[in-house]
Amino acid sequence: MATRSTIAIEHQDGTVEQIYCHWDGYLDHNGRLLLEHWTDPVKLQQLIDLGDVSVLGAVLGDQWSVIRAQREPLTKFEDPCTFYGRDLKNKDTGSKQFKNFDDYAQNHEYQEYEYILRSDGKWYVQSYETNNALIGLEEAFNMVMTDERTN
C-alpha cells in the first residue's frame, strides 16, 4: 500500500511549486531522503521540474538508470527517482503553482505527508505524526524517535 506525499519548494519571490509522490512518503524514507539529498534549492528545482514522482530516490537519474535499478536493485537510498512523465510516459504530471505560501496553504494537494523546503532553507513537514501542524522536518524526526523509544 502506498504512503503518499507531496514535495514543495517556496521560492525567494514567495511563489510555491508542488509535486506529488506516490510511494514511501513516511518520514524515515522520503523525509530522510529530502534531508540528506534534496536540500539544495537548485537540485530540488530540477526534481520539481520533472513533475510528479512515483518513487523518490537519492538522485534524479535518467530513464535508463531507472530500468537498470529495477533489474539490479541498489539500496533504497541509492536508487534514482522514477517520474510519472519521464519514465512512465504519463501525461499532465507537471508541478502545481501557487502565488504565495498562503495560497499554497489553502489550496495545495493534501496527502499523508506534505514536505516543503521553505525560503529560509529548512525542510518542513505536516502529517498525522505532527498532529497536522507544519513543523521542521528535523523536529519531526526527533518527535518520532522519542515516541518510538518511549513505546
Image (cartoon, rainbow, N blue to C red):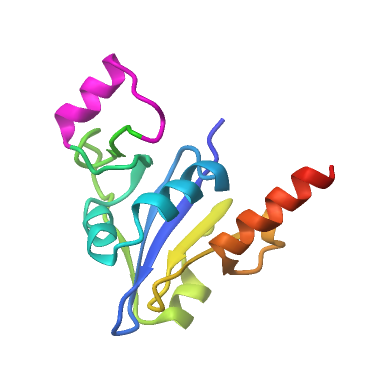
Which residue is pictured at 39% across the width and 63% down the height? 8
Indicate left or right for 104 with 141 as reference.
Answer: left
The x, y position of residue 110, in whole percent, is 53, 59
Quarter of the picture holding the N terminus: top right
The x, y position of residue 82, in whole percent, is 29, 36
Indicate left or right for 91 with 15 as reference.
Answer: left
Front-most of residues 125 and 136: 136
The x, y position of residue 89, in whole percent, is 21, 36
Farthest bottom residue in view: 13
In the image, residue 111 sits, relative to residue 136, either above or below, namely above
Verify whether residue 71 appears in magenta.
Answer: yes
Quarter of the picture holding the C terminus: top right
In the rendered structure, which segment of residues is drawn in magenta? 62-77
The x, y position of residue 65, in whole percent, is 19, 29
Which residue is pictured at 46% across the width and 66% down the height? 108
Indicate left or right for 22 with 141 as reference.
Answer: left
Please indicate, yes or no, whether residue 127 appears anywhere in the rendered image: no
Q: How many marks?
A: 0
Please indicate, yes or no, whether residue 134 appears anywhere in the rendered image: yes
Quarter occupied by residue 13: bottom left
In the image, residue 137 sits, relative to residue 54, either above or below, namely below
Front-most of residues 13 and 74: 74
Front-most of residues 70 and 4: 70
Farthest right residue in view: 151
Verify whether residue 59 appears in magenta.
Answer: no
Quarter occupied by residue 49: bottom left
Which residue is pictured at 34% across the width and 55% down the height? 38
Front-most of residues 145 and 93: 145
